[in-house]
């Protein structure tokens, strides 16, 4: 089966919220947990604003994924920069805008491109062709670690009991830096590096092992009736695809990546944040237990802000690994840091907007 990525309005359903846990950090003076001040709406009436970026002068460039449009918003007016299927992965570097497009659905992939437009001209990299030739997670195994033949026989056709990484690509998050663009590809389950038109793998993130609970047995519905896995799966370990959703660089030079486990159904509230060395590709878990980790930002002091699309909040992970709620936000997706403020795209399954929250206690 392919991973369940929350890129459509149908995915906006209630899920069981798990406890958020962090990986222990070296003993240091515990930084104060930040809190949010009153929010300010910067843009509204957007259609699926899953990713966006901000310029220093306050210009907002947003991928309206469900509309298939990249839009620039400045001074109360908007301008369409491009139109294409499932426009996400928006990143801005000076006058150049980078974004991604994907054609297909959760079961099929018809095309995937990383695009940019700026003074140097327009570029388009065929990520699907690169994935077909390389498939970075082709050696990774997903699905149930151990399942009896009898139990496997009860699974619906779309639930593959055990499989290796499939050919799929969706450059959900991008980070454009001078001379290099990093990509969090939720289809490849990998972080990529793009220099010019050359694509390479930085890291393949590890599968996320999850122990199936009774609540996780619901994996979909047909004509309003739930599809429920047999009780024999309860207690089994399922290795979910990691599904990277965003990538940012901290002041420590490390990449920080949010992930959303890909597994049948929506009952797996174990989104995570990883720290990835951009040179060696080594990865380490920072924190897990997020209900729909679809975006993150890193403040200059090292605090990581991560959205919980299905948890209805943005959480803060301080340098000592402590996790706290920064702000309650309706269906948050993209997160960016700008001049002492955390900027979030919210209400992404309805009347979308971009909201700025001043940070207190940092």
Image: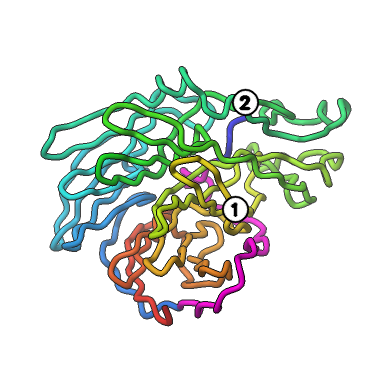
Magenta segment includes 229: no
Q: Which mark is residue 139?
A: 2
Q: Secondary structure at mark 1?
A: strand
Q: Which mark is residue 239?
A: none
Question: Left or right: 287 with respect to 352?
Answer: right
Q: Quadrant of residue 146?
A: top right
Q: Quadrant of the N terminus?
A: top right
Label 2 Cα neighbours within 10 Å, binned few <14 / some 14-19 / many ≥20: few
- Identify which residue, 183 or 106, lies in the foreground: 183
Question: Which residues lie in the magenta part?
Answer: 5-34
The structure residue drawn at horizontal position 51% and vertical position 68%, both measured from the top left corner, is: 319
- Identify which residue, 219 or 253, lies in the foreground: 253
- Would you say residue 220 is visible in this rendering? no
The structure residue drawn at horizontal position 88% and vertical position 27%, both measured from the top left corner, is: 150
Q: Which residue was labeled with disc 1? A: 285
Residue 309's place in the image compared with 175, above or below, is: below
Q: Residue furthest left?
A: 119
Q: Secondary structure at mark 2?
A: loop
């Amino acid at each position: 089966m392919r991973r369940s990525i929350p890129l459509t309005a149908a995915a906006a359903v209630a899920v069981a919220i798990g406890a958020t846990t962090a990986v222990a950090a070296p003993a240091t003076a515990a930084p104060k947990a930040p809190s949010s001040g009153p929010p300010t709406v910067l843009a509204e009436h957007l259609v699926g604003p899953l990713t966006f970026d901000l310029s220093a002068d306050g210009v907002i460039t947003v991928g309206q994924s469900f509309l298939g449009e990249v839009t620039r918003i400045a001074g109360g007016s908007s301008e369409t920069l491009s139109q294409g299927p499932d426009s996400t992965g928006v990143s801005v570097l000076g006058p150049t805008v980078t974004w991604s497009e994907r054609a297909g659905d959760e079961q099929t992939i018809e095309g995937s491109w990383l695009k940019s437009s700026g003074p140097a001209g327009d570029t388009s990299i065929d990520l699907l062709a690169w994935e077909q030739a390389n498939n970075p997670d082709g050696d990774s195994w997903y699905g149930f670690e151990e399942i009896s033949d009898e139990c496997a026989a009860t699974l619906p056709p779309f639930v593959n009991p055990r499989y290796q990484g499939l050919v799929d690509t969706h450059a959900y998050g991008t980070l454009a830096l001078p001379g290099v663009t990093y990509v969090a590809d939720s289809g490849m389950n990998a972080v990529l590096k793009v220099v010019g038109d050359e694509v390479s793998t930085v890291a393949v993130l590890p599968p996320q092992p999850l122990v199936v609970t009774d609540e996780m047995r619901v994996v979909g519905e047909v004509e309003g009736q739930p599809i429920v896995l047999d009780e024999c799966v309860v207690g089994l370990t399922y290795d979910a695809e990691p599904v990277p959703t965003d990538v940012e660089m901290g002041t420590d030079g490390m990449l920080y990546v949010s992930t959303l486990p890909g597994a049948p159904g929506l009952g797996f509230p174990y989104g995570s944040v990883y720290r990835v060395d951009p040179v060696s590709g080594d990865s380490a878990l920072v924190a897990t237990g997020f209900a729909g980790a679809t975006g993150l930002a890193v403040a200059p002091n090292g605090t990581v802000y991560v959205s919980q699309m299905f948890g209805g909040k943005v959480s803060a992970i301080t340098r000592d690994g402590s996790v706290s709620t920064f702000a309650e936000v309706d269906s948050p997706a993209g997160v960016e840091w700008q001049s002492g403020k955390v900027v979030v795209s919210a209400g992404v399954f309805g009347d979308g907007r971009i909201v700025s929250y001043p940070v207190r206690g940092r």
